[in-house]
Amino acid sequence: MIELKDIKKKKDKYILNINDNEIEVFEEVIIKFMLLKKREIDDNEYKEILDYIKYTDSLHLAITYLKKPRTTYEVKKYLKDLKLYDEKIIKKLLDMGLLNDRIYTDMYVDYQSRINLKGPKLIKKELEIKGVHLDFEYPNYEENVKKIIDRYLKNNKDKPTKMLNYGLNNYLIAKGFDKCDEYFYNEDRELIKKDIDKLLIKNKKLEGYKLKQKLYTSLINKGYESSLINEFIDKL
């Protein structure tokens, strides 16, 4: 026969002395099995107590993990990684309202679109990685696209027109938006003058054909049009 010899309170848990072995348990275990005083425990009840201890320990771990918003998939993976997964825990968390993929999705879309200016395609991909496949309404699409374009143009005033638009569209796609239909222009003639001056200083040991070849290669790689490059190189 198994004997409960002592019960002590320890912060938010209790310590049970069962056959001289101390086991920490949550209050739910004490209440469910009426472990309020010394008594004998039969084998079947002891097995039920141990199973419930594992359940409550796992549940409290999951609740602690949910101090930061998580999806159902993330919690399941967390418990499986700890080898503590139990479908009853997921059901309990859902019943408690601590797990709700619909609410999580709406909050995630709001935050990522408003704070990080992420587009719907990127957000959808990130949610799918988190195990969520729900539809959502994306707010302020055009407004966010404009913010991204304005920011990109402001930070890339030194890029030739072709490279500017190429980079912008790549950036929009990476952020989860569609390509931009509008074509933007920079002052390529002014930019190429500055770049040629820098290249001449950098390659001052070169001259003639080798110099022009070096300038052409460098400028074409920067995204300038071939005709514009030749126009300025021919003047050297």
Image: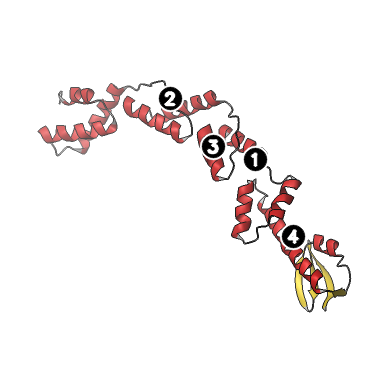
Instruction: Tell me, yes or no, whether the two marked residues, 2 and 4, touch with CB atoms within 8 Å.
Output: no
N-terminal of the pair, mark 3 or mark 4, is 4
**What whole-number distance in Å separates the C-alpha atoms at marks 3 and 4?**
34 Å
**What whole-number distance in Å separates the C-alpha atoms at marks 2 and 1?**
30 Å
**What whole-number distance in Å separates the C-alpha atoms at marks 3 and 1?**
12 Å
Amino acid type, label 3: Ile
Give how far across and how far down residue 83 sits, in percent: 62, 62
Q: Residues within 10 Å of mark 1 (few under 14, many from 20)?
A: some
- Kindly indicate the quadrant of the structure image that contains residue 173: top left
The kind of secondary structure element at disc 3 is helix
Q: Dot 2 corresponds to which residue?
A: 180
Q: Dot 4 corresponds to which residue?
A: 56
The kind of secondary structure element at disc 4 is helix
Q: Residue at x 76, y 69 (%)?
A: 47
User: Left of 49 or right of it: where is 138?
Assistant: left
N-terminal of the pair, mark 3 or mark 1, is 1
Q: Dot 3 corresponds to which residue?
A: 123
* Picture quarter with the N terminus: bottom right
The kind of secondary structure element at disc 2 is loop
Give the answer, above or below, for where 213 lies relative to 22.
above
Residue 33: give its label. Answer: none
**What whole-number distance in Å separates the C-alpha atoms at marks 2 and 4?**
53 Å
Amino acid type, label 4: Thr
Q: Nearer the viewer, residue 152 or 193?
A: 152
Instruction: Tell me, yes or no, whether the two marked residues, 3 and 4, touch with CB atoms within 8 Å.
Output: no
Q: Residue at x 22, y 26 (%)?
A: 226
Q: Dot 1 corresponds to which residue?
A: 104
